[in-house]
Each structure stands twice: as structure tokens, then as C-alpha cells.
Image (spheres, grey):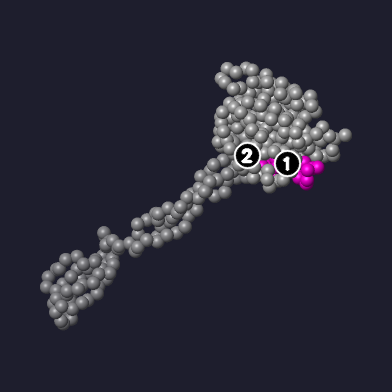
Amino acid sequence: GKAGCVSDVMLVVDRSGSIGSTNWRQMVNYMKSRVTRTTFTDASGNRLGVVAYSTVSTIECRLQYSKSDLLNCIDGISYTRGWTNTAEGINDAGAELQSLSSSSRIRVIEVITDGESKLSQNDRQTTVRTRQAAAAQKAKGVVILAIGVGDGVNVDELKQMASEPTENHWTNLGRFDSLVRLSEAISGSCVPEIQGGSDRLWECKSSDASSTDDWCASNCYDADNKLVAACDPTSGSAVCRCPVDCEVGRWTSWSECSVTCGAGNMTKTRPVITPASGGGAACPTTQQVKPCRRRRCPQTPPTSCAGSQSIVCSSSGDPHVRTFTGKKSHPMGQGEYVLAVCGSFRVHACHE
């Protein structure tokens, strides 16, 4: 019989030109997640290897059980671009299993691709060779998982690569972000498989039916990794009604003071990146204000006065200083000043 819950898994990873550098980093993170979520002991336990392919295929990481060596190896895999030679990737993975594994162990080839197998624009033969390569491995007792990701997936090719029962051995993820969910689902199985993978919604669209976020995708599943009713296509709606929390960006720097003199305010703001929807958490404050003070403002003479009075310099000395309450208007006779009573005014040269 086969060894108890241990397996030899070869990841066969597409690195063709259609993947793109950003999505390739997601693929690398997925491979590393598969390693970290796998329990390794010794040569008799779980082992994992990696084949990466585009126009040509290469065994990048030999089948092994050293977690640290595998992680280092995956970090060193380069993104090559090129065409999609899935057939050669499957053949290389099968050769590695043939060489280092045995029929007494669970053997798995896990293919991840973003498109149809082809080596030129009008190539129709490579997809045939891919199906033939998969059939040859399945005939040897190897389990094949066929995983599509991205917008250009050939669903028929995935189904024909997948082992039986087909519904548990193929899936179409959609966005590359959903690889995180895939790692969680596969790593929890003794024999790697995807329960209900063929019709599973890895991406839950938000209630506006136009965007997808990671939080919603994570929370549309229960603790057993099963779809909740709101995201189950059989419930009559394929739109996720999960609440989406508001997400805000970083604070700006404080603004300049709002005044050029005296007391004013300074403000800083942060943008709303994702508005709350479906009952999600409301946005936190997006503006803060604090007081500021500039230089003292110059005093402006009054433009009108409440009344007037006549003051006559009477003390001796020439000149001398007298302080009056009021505003100086103009001299009215020898030594006499008329003052409007509405402020403080100092007479500096008062002559009798």
C-alpha cells in the first residue's frame, strides 16, 4: 500500500511572458507558501520539488525535504518569459518522480498556468501534447492538479489534465491574489486536492460587482474553507455580499498656517482608498486640525470715533509729553489739540 499521509509533490509553474513580473512574484510567494505549510521530516516523509517552464522547461528545485533549501531555491528561480510549453513541464516533473520516488508513495504533479499551451501564435499541437503528457503520468498513478490563474486560461485543457474525480483536481482562480487561498486549501489535504475546486469562487466580487478585494475573498469562506451562502453560485447570486471595511491612505504633511498673522489653524488629510460598503467598518477621520500662531498683527487705527474733547497743553517745558485717550485730529489754535475718544494716542511734541 501507499505510505501514510505523505506525498512527493512536483510544482510545475508557468513563467511565460503573459504572466508578467508582478504576477510572477505572486507565483513565487505561492510556491514558498506551499513549502512553509508542508510538514517535512526526513526522506521518508513529505518531499517537494519545482519545475518552471516557458518555451523550455527546467527542473529548478530537486525533489527534497529540506524546507530551508527549498525556500532558498525558490528565491533563486528567475522569470524568463517566452511561450507556454506545459507538456515539457509535465514530462520533466514526471521524470523527477520516476527517478526519486516510487509507486508506494503518493505522487502529485501540480500544474499552475495562466494560459493555453502553445509555442507560436497559431500552434494547436502543443495543447494536444500537454494532454498526452498528463495522460501518461496519470496512467502511472500520478495525481495531477490543474490550476488556472489569470484571464487567458483554457478551461478544457485544465479539465483534461486533471485527475479523477475531475471536480476535485482542477480550478480556475481568476486573480493571482487568490493563490493565497489556494495554498491554504491544498495544504490542508493529506493527498493534495481542491474540494469542489471546479465551481469554487476564489474571488468574491464586492457588492458593486466590479471590484474584488482580498478581505472579501478571505471572509466569504467559513472555518472549514467552504463557501458561505452569499458567495455560492447555487444560491442565485455570484456576487459577494460580504462587508467591505473602509480603507484609507497615508496622512499628508501639515499644511501652512491659515493666517499670515495672529491665530489660525493647520490641517492634514488622508484619502479614502476603498469606501465602506455592505455594512463594513466606516472610514476613520480623514482630517486633523491643530492651532497655530503667526507674528502679532499690526494695529489698525479706528475709522470712526465715539466723540471728541478738547485738550490744551498747560504744563511748562518745551517740548514735553502728555498722554491722552483718543485720536489726534488737527491743531485748533495755539497749543490746543482736538482728540476723538476712541483709543490711545500719545502726543510727543506738545507746545504751549
User: Dot 1 surroundings within 10 Å: few (below 14), some, or many (20 or more)?
Assistant: many
Tell me if 325 is positioned left or right of 118 in this view.
Answer: left
Q: Which mark is residue 28?
A: 2
Q: For the magenta stretch, what is the residue range?
A: 32-46
User: Which residue shows up at 55% across the image and 36% down it?
Assistant: 21
Residue located farthest toward the left when viewing the structure as drawn:
334
Q: Which mark is residue 64?
A: 1
**Which numbered circle lies on residue 125?**
none
In the picture, residue 144 is in which quadrant?
A: top right
User: Residue 124 location in percent, x, y?
Assistant: 62, 17
Residue 89 lies, with reference to residue 340, above or below; the image says: above
**Local SS, label 1:** strand
Work out which quarter of the rendered image holds the N terminus and state it: top right
- Secondary structure type for disc 2: helix
Place of residue 153 in the rendered image (x, y in percent of width and height, measured from the top left): 63, 25
Q: Amino acid at mark 1?
A: Gln
